[in-house]
Amino acid sequence: MRLLALVALFCAVMAGCGPRGPDVQLVEGFVTLDGSPCAGAIVGFSPVVGGVPATGRTGPDGSYRITAVRGGRERGGTTVGEYLVTIDKMELLPPPPNPLGQQLEPEFRYIVPKAYGDQATSGLKATVRRGLNAGPEFRFDLRSDFQPPASETPKK
């Protein structure tokens, strides 16, 4: 009995004897580009207020599950709240011929339009609630010809 009490005390002190990290909710969905699954895209959830940022990568069928950046278990989700969503996918272009041996900056081609990768221009949002978060509100149908709305000019 005494040994059991010591083990319990040790567990409480060393590991907390409870779940570690934030209280996360499972988030899963799909990303398409021009109607086809968008494989290999990075999906980012950035909290509007409080919350925990989370990211995930789409699979071959365009499906994703996100992981909280701070302390979440892999593919475990994120905390309850409102999120701005970004989606990035680009490829590294082969370097141009460089006869002088200069170090060149890498160049990328955006497969998903760059505007989807910026919180200010993506126009994508999600609300994470308790429990499983899936369905149409976590499906993002992107378009190659996407142009963010022009910002309003201040009125005088």
Image (cartoon, grey):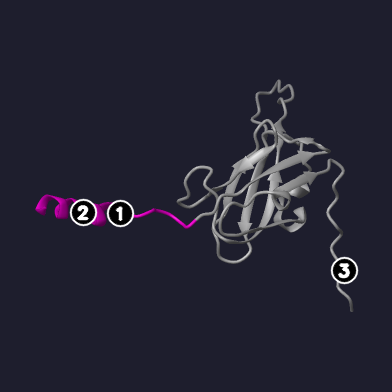
Q: Does the magenta portion include 40?
A: no
Callout 1, which amino acid? Answer: Cys
> Which image quadrant for residue 113?
top right
* Residue 86 horizontal/vertical position (percent): 69, 50
- Please tell me which residue lies in front, 21 or 151: 21
Q: Residue at x 72, y 41 (%)?
A: 31
- Please rate how many residues cluster around mark 3, counting C-alpha atoms within 10 Å: few if below 14, some from 14 to 19, many from 20: few
> CA gap, disc 1 to disc 3?
55 Å
Q: Position of residue 136 (x, y in %)?
A: 73, 50
Disc 2 is placed on an element classified as helix
As drawn, 114 above or below 23: above
Q: Position of residue 143 (x, y in %)?
A: 83, 43
Rendered view: 13 above or below 144: below
Say what amino acid the circle numbered 3 marks. Thr
Q: Which residue is mark 3?
A: 153
To which residue does mark 1 refer?
A: 17
- Secondary structure mostly taken by the magenta-highlighted segment of the chain: helix
Asked if the residues shown at circle 1 and circle 3 are in contact, with their CB atoms under 8 angstroms apart, the answer is no
Which span of residues is magenta-colored? 1-23
Residue 152 sits in quarter: bottom right
Q: Which residue is mark 2?
A: 8
- The residue under the point 72% across, 53% down is 137
> From the viewer's perspective, is the residue at label 2 or at label 3 nearer?
2
**Tag 3 secondary structure:** loop
Which tag, 1 or 3, sits closer to the chain's start? Answer: 1
The amino acid pointed to by label 2 is Ala
- Disc on the earlier residue, 2 or 3: 2
